[in-house]
Amino acid sequence: MIFRKKILLYTLISSVAVIPVSAQHTMHQMVSDGAWRMVPMDMNMPMLPGLEGVVPVVSPFLPGSDIDVSSIPAAISSEIVRLAEGDTLELTVSMVRRNVANREVVMFGYNGQYPGPLIEVMKGSTATIRVKNEIQMPTTIHWHGVRLENQFDGVPGITQKSIATGEHFLYEVKVPDAGMYWYHPHVREDVQQDLGLYGNLLVRSPDSAYYGPVHREEMLIVDDLLMDDEGILPWGSEAPTHALMGRFGNVMLVNGQTEHALTVSSGEVIRFFITNVANSRTFNITFGANRTKLVASDVSRYQREQWISSVVIAPGERYVVDVQFESSGQTIIANTIQAVNHFRGEFYPHVDTLSQISVSDGREKNDLDGEFELLRENIEVISEIEQFETYFNQVPDYELETTVRVRNLPISIVISMESDTLYVPPMEWNDAMPMMNWLSTGEQVTWILREKYSGLENGDIQWEFDQGDVVKIRIFNSPDSFHPMNHPIHLHGQRFLVLNRDGNLNQNLVWKDTAILPVGSTMDLLVEMSNPGEWMFHCHISEHLQAGMSFNFTVREF
Ligand SMILES: [Cu+2]
């Protein structure tokens, strides 16, 4: 350990950008041009010596900084679009004007909406969406979680050319699995997705009893945005800032709003479809004292419904829960976490309100108490997964581990991060070192997926499968790297089961496309290679993806 530290200290030579004194004095005037502004800091956190006035080594980017903001149309809230076979949705990507946390900001939107339209389709149908790009950056759309035809997966340079400004692309999205999916760009997600380019795709089952009965359905798209008094903090232009831990926001958003609220009747059962679209933040969502039933996740229902006390949801994941609100009065949906203070090595409880719920006195007339009590066994899911049981105990076909490499970071960051690994938490629920995180860019940090035996890393990894192969992949998140971090691992175009974590068998399986890997943990994924094409395997923290944490694998048509 000591040896490793020494090597790092002597080999990582500090190379930093410093705001010249003259520029520091005029920083306020430069704000509207998208100049760097100091990242918001918690007053409890000391400024590291030598970092005063230091800014990221990349240039700042804010959309619309050269345009009269009043000329940009105001965004509207999300609309539901039901698409039947043969219908085409025209989806335009453009700049929108928004008011977030009482600040007027320029963001991006799909059809001028926040979030993008909720697209609802029937299982087995094909949704046709023509995307027109009107922003000054190339873009694409990735249909997250959908086992669609490879050419519509939205990966620039792999499945399509990115859509240039003024150009179109026609997506034909065939949806084989019921559930909640989402769509977002696969070009600089750290910028475009953070600016509001995300929406839900709800795939309905023809079976009306696919889920249990509820009074109402609500979408909860959870997100966070990094803001100060002036508005949104700029993003890195040539490469992302916040490459170490990802860009955590300090303003919580539900469905793009800071003031999400619901009014419900006492006894009402609500189904929440939760999607995490944040760049990096994993949420631990609680529903007050209200009973919460876990129903489904990314690509299927669970084998068995179960009572839970909270939903841990990483970027990219979806969960479906049914909640019954019993007692009248006020309650909240919250992000309830154990935050860490790296400088003190302490954990402290922290609660952020996501939604205010007013439960009225009037009892819900059509009562579902009996149905809600019931925990259903999903026989179709159980019997389908049974067919994969022969693979459960096989030795892994592939083993990966995660790590990180840094170069040219300011020396005080290196020293501070090194001492920090002494008490690294399995999950980073908050950004406890905002300045250091902000200053670490994609030009200094490389996040790595490494094949354990070959030593091949990221894009050098070459996996080929035949359609129909069932493959066990073991992934280990090494706690012994420069700054370890949890990673949501996402596979395109296929579905997988998380068989076990740290040797503990998963007793209630569900088909997934994204799974969180805490620091120090090992998980075994059983992937059904059902869908031919060239597909991505990557970390869903936007900044980690931009910092290299990705490779492609091929499934040959059989
Ligand atoms: Cu990651």
Image (cartoon, rainbow, N blue to C red):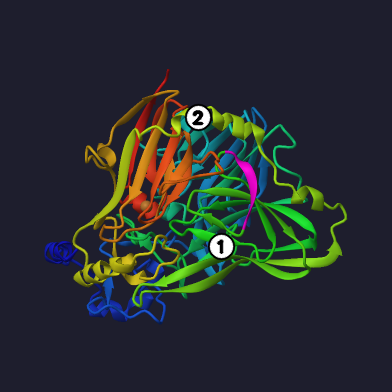
Mark 2–mark 1 Cα distance, whole angstroms, equals 39 Å
Task: Say if mark 2 contacts mark 1, CB within 8 Å.
Answer: no
**Horizontal and vertical percent position of residue 107:** 50, 58
Question: What amino acid type should be assigned to the residue bearing mark 2?
Answer: Phe
* Residue 253 tag number: 1
Q: Is residue 77 visible?
A: yes
Is residue 284 toward the left or the right of residue 43 in the image?
Answer: right
Q: For the residue with label 2, is its CB less than 8 Å from the closest atom of ligand 1?
A: no
Residue at the far top: name it: 558
Instruction: Say which of marks 2 and 1 sits in front.
Output: 2
Q: Quadrant of the C terminus?
A: top left
Give the residue drawn at x 55%, y 48%: 318
Q: Main secondary structure of the magenta part?
A: strand
The residue to which callout 2 is attached is: 388
| First reached walking from the N terminus: tag 2 or tag 1 | 1
Residue 148 lies, in percent from the top left, at: 51, 31
Q: Range of the magenta residues? A: 300-308
Among the 4 quarters of the image, the one containing residue 393: top left
Q: Which mark is residue 225?
A: none
Instruction: Name the secondary structure under disc 2.
Output: loop
24 is higher (above) or lower (below) than 64? below
Q: Amino acid at mark 1?
A: Leu
Position of residue 127 in the picture relative to residue 246 (left or right): right
Which quadrant of the view contains residue 470?
Answer: top left
Any part of residue 185 in sight:
no
Residue in view at x 39 percent, y 26 percent: 555
Mark 2 nearby-residue class (10 Å; few <14, some 14–19, many ≥20): some
The residue depicted at 50 percent of the width and 29 percent of the height is 388
